[in-house]
Amino acid sequence: MILDPTRIGNREKLILTGMFLSKFGSLGLKRLGFQTYAEAYNVVGYALGSRPTSIKNYRDEFDPVFPNSRKGWHKREIREYCRKVLDEYGNLEFESFVGLIKSFTGFDENALSAYQISDGGDERSSGFAKRLITGLAAERYFEAVHATLPEFRGFSVENTTQLGCGYDFKLSQKEESDFLAIEVKGIREQSGSVSLTPREYEVATELRDRFYLFVVKNFQRVPYHEIFLNPTAGKLQFTRVERVVIQVSWLTRM
């Protein structure tokens, strides 16, 4: 089977994530770096631009199919479109399935393996969850809620995450030349550490009252957000941290 995530629709990605969690349970959670099912639903659900409960519903859909302690939706037949996904991917072995789920959000484990991690953690298992929480999942959360927030109501939104400008979103109004810059971060629990890159810190200091730090907290249970205006001059205290990362490669002569 050729696994090409670009040919898999978003609903099918949600279905496959639910199937993976149903089939592999706690082993699958650990391999993706999640501590609870709720965390997996929240992080992957937001990262795929959907409701976290969608993944839970699909896991329940497949629970009667795979041997586990959950009953799931055992009182009715599996839906036809879920049956088709099951027939195509149900026999996928563990590591291939892990790689498929990670590919849905553009995660490249091969790129991660080029670096020697010095903190002693199992980066291979936890890297996927950490990167989604601090990046894509938090950004998609912002996209889902920003229009409901009084600070940002009436602004048009431009995603600038790939432009290297020091913030994730640019908010503008037609009648105003100034814009708001939003840098989005995510943390697993209700408290934790948030870091700014040198570029982000520089832009935050320069833009001051036009720069917002938007922090999504508690992905492990029920995500919520906290907003910090002019974060480098407010109540937050930033400390300069320098870290050396050793890149590892293998060389041969030909």
Image (tube, rainbow, N blue to C red):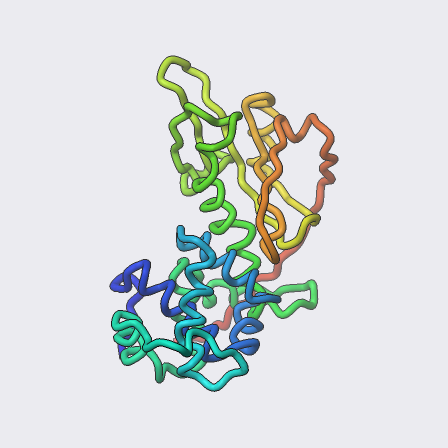
User: Total number of numbered labels?
Assistant: 0
- Name the residue at 46% across, 58% down: 53
Viewer-nearest residue: 189 or 64: 64
Query: Would residue 68 appear left or right of 177 to someone viewing this image?
Result: right
- Give the position of the N terminus as an image quadrant: bottom left
The spot of residue 165 in percent (x, y) is 47, 34
Taking depth in this image into account, of 78 and 188 the one nearest to the observer is 78
At which x and y percent is residue 46?
Answer: 46, 52
Q: Does residue 186 lie above or below 72 as drawn?
A: above
Q: Is residue 197 visible?
A: no
Q: Quadrant of residue 246?
A: bottom right
Mark yes or no: residue 11 visible: yes
Q: Quadrant of the C terminus?
A: bottom left
Does residue 113 lie above or below 68 as drawn? above
Q: Nearer the viewer, residue 192 or 109?
A: 192
Q: Position of residue 93 (x, y in %)?
A: 40, 83
Residue, x 72% and y 37% (percent of image)? 238
Question: x, y (%) of residue 3?
Answer: 30, 72
The residue lying at 37 percent from left, 69 percent from top is 16
Residue 53 position (above or below residue 76)? above
User: Residue placed farthest to the front in the image?
Assistant: 75
Res 13 quadrant in image: bottom left
237 on left or right of 140: right
Locate residue 19 relative to residue 166 in the image: left or right: left
